């Protein structure tokens, strides 16, 4: 009986672990901002609010411009699951509701890491994400994700 209880407990713990969302710090993407931005780190919840346009200004009062990637890029799903803890489909449904109610429009979408880097480098308030292995270009820096 005791062995059965132990086995069930182990299975429950493993099951919970498998269902837990991927931690942002362990993900296969990195958050990037313009290198003129003094911010060095943000927590996952605030990054989510930024990309859902619930937080619209940096601490220095600069307007935040979030830049998403299209759902055709592999990094988009990883970002959505780690940052929003929701699928891309769920985030798209959120934006459909926002558009339909006339409250807001989704962030601009780019088709590649290179396009995101170019836009972030040219906009001091921009924030985006790229694949973890992407080499950063001039004018862009990585933002540390805290939990």
Image (cartoon, rainbow, N blue to C red):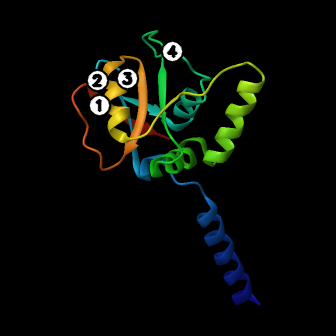
Task: Give yes or no for contact between labels 2 and 4 (Cβ–Cβ under 8 Å).
Answer: no
Tag on residue 141? 1
- Answer with mark 2 or mark 1, whichever residue precedes in sequence: 2
| Number of marks in picture | 4
- Answer with mark 3 or mark 4, whichever residue precedes in sequence: 3
Along the viewing direction, whichever of 12 and 69 lies nearer the viewer: 69
Callout in the foreground (3, 4): 4
Location of residue 44 with respect to 2 vertically, above or below: above
The image quarter containing residue 33 is top left
Instruction: Inspect this view and state whether residue 145 appears.
Output: yes
- Residue 56 position in % (x across, y down): 55, 17
Residue at 46% from the left image edge and 52% from the top image edge: 74
Local secondary structure at mark 4: loop
Disc 2/disc 4 C-alpha distance (Å): 16 Å
Location of residue 56 with respect to 118 vertically, above or below: above
Q: What residue is shown with label 4?
A: 57
Task: Give yes or no for contact between labels 2 and 1 (Cβ–Cβ under 8 Å).
Answer: yes
- Answer with mark 2 or mark 4, whichever residue precedes in sequence: 2
- Answer with mark 4 or mark 1, whichever residue precedes in sequence: 4
Q: What residue is shown with label 3?
A: 39
- Answer with mark 3 or mark 1, whichever residue precedes in sequence: 3
Local secondary structure at mark 2: loop
Disc 3/disc 1 C-alpha distance (Å): 10 Å
Callout in the foreground (3, 1): 1
Instruction: Inspect this view and state whether residue 37 appears.
Output: no
Q: Quadrant of the N terminus?
A: bottom right
Disc 3/disc 4 C-alpha distance (Å): 12 Å
Task: Give yes or no for contact between labels 3 and 1 (Cβ–Cβ under 8 Å).
Answer: no
Residue at 71% from the left image edge and 39% from the top image edge: 93
Q: What residue is shown with label 2?
A: 35
- Residue 18 position in % (x across, y down): 60, 66
């Amino acid at each position: 009986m005791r062995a059965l209880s132990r086995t069930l407990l182990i299975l429950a713990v493993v099951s919970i672990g498998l269902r837990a969302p991927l931690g942002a710090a362990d993900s296969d993407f990195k958050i990037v901002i313009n290198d003129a931005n003094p911010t060095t780190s943000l927590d996952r919840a605030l990054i989510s609010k930024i990309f859902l346009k619930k937080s619209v200004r940096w601490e220095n009062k600069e307007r935040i411009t979030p830049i998403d990637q299209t759902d055709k890029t592999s990094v988009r799903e990883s970002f959505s699951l780690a940052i929003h803890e929701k699928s891309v489909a769920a985030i798209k449904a959120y934006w459909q509701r926002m558009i339909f109610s006339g409250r807001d429009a989704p962030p601009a979408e780019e088709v590649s890491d290179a396009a995101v880097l170019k836009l972030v480098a040219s906009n001091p308030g921009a924030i985006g994400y790229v694949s973890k292995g992407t080499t950063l270009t001039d004018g862009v820096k990585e933002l540390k994700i805290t939990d």
